[in-house]
Amino acid sequence: MTPMLRAMRALLAVTIAEFAEYRALTFIWMLAGTLPIIMMFVWIGAAGTGEVAGYDAADFARYFMLAFLTGQLVQVWVIWSLDEQIRLGRMSILLVRPIDPFWALVAHNLIGNGTRLPIALAVTAIGLALGGAFTGLPWHRLPLFALSLAGAWMIAFNLNYALGLLSLWTDRAIALEGWYYVVSTVLAGELFPLDLLPADLRAVVDCTPFPYIVNVPVEIMTGGMTLDEAATALAIQLLWALAFIAAHRLLWRLGLRRYGAVGA
């Protein structure tokens, strides 16, 4: 086993032990991601016994319960972690470890999302059943859905990592988290299905990375995309993820020089 693999195994073990000790955090983070469920009731109420732009009550239940599940599995908190580590000087300790601090946050976020998975699946199943939304789901698309979730997480994590590294230049980088949350919530499709937007506005929104974090996985799983459209969306997810990886690697190299220059 290579030193990198041994380090990662030890890191994962420590992270799992940490989450086992602080189990209450899992429920707190889950509560922070229940906005799609709230919006489901709003839109179901708006639809009543009819439809809104082609969506009936079951369609809204199907969309928002899958949006809830997607949001739980792609949730990241990298900006907060990097801001604290850099501002308080804890990054210095991480720099002497035989592994890039990037991987420590990868492990922390993946294990955190994994601890929520059983509960998130149960809540989603109950919501789909109560909303009469199980029927009509193309279950053969589960592998594509899983791939799109991986792509969505890569976009969200690496985008947040790039934003968090701005803490190397300013002590107000944490303020970006609030803006990121608002923009991503609206443009990712957690407040409403993006199909409800006018065509011109939807085209503009699709030029940002945010629809590929929530809306795209949901549309893939609900059958809102053809297989060709799903393949294209997966490729675009990969491109966005690679772009943000390149961005935060550049910011890391430039920012690390400044971090050392001030005596940290």
Image: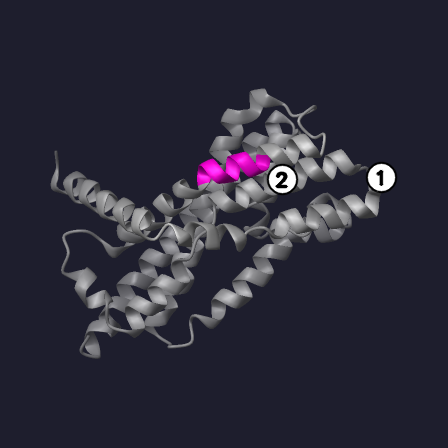
- Residue, disc 1: 51
Q: Residue at x 37, y 44 (%)?
A: 110
Residue farthest to the bottom?
262
For the N terminus, which image quadrant? top left
Residue name at image x 18 percent, y 44 percent: 10
Which residue reaches farthest right? 50
Three-letter code for the amino acid on which mark 1 is drawn? Glu
Name the quadrant of the C terminus.
bottom left
The disc at residue 65 is: 2
Q: Callout 2: helix, strand or loop?
A: helix
User: Is residue 31 visible to the viewer in this orientation of the structure?
Assistant: yes
Residue nearer the viewer, 231 or 115: 115
Count neighbours of disc 1 (C-alpha within 10 A) and say few if under 14, some if 14 to 19, many if 20 or more: some
Q: What's drawn in magenta, residue-wise?
A: 117-124
Instruction: State how far apart marks 1 and 2 are (Cα).
Output: 18 Å
Dot 2 amino acid type = Met
Image quarter for residue 58? top right
Say whether residue 232 is left or right of residue 63.
left
Residue sitting at x 28%, y 51%: 18
Label 1 vs 2, first from the N-terminus: 1
Based on the picture, tell me whether residue 214 belongs to the magenta stretch: no
Magenta residue check for 119: yes
**Depth check, front residue: 224 or 116:** 116
Percent from the top left, x then y, of residue 5?
18, 39
**Under tag 1, what secondary structure?**
loop
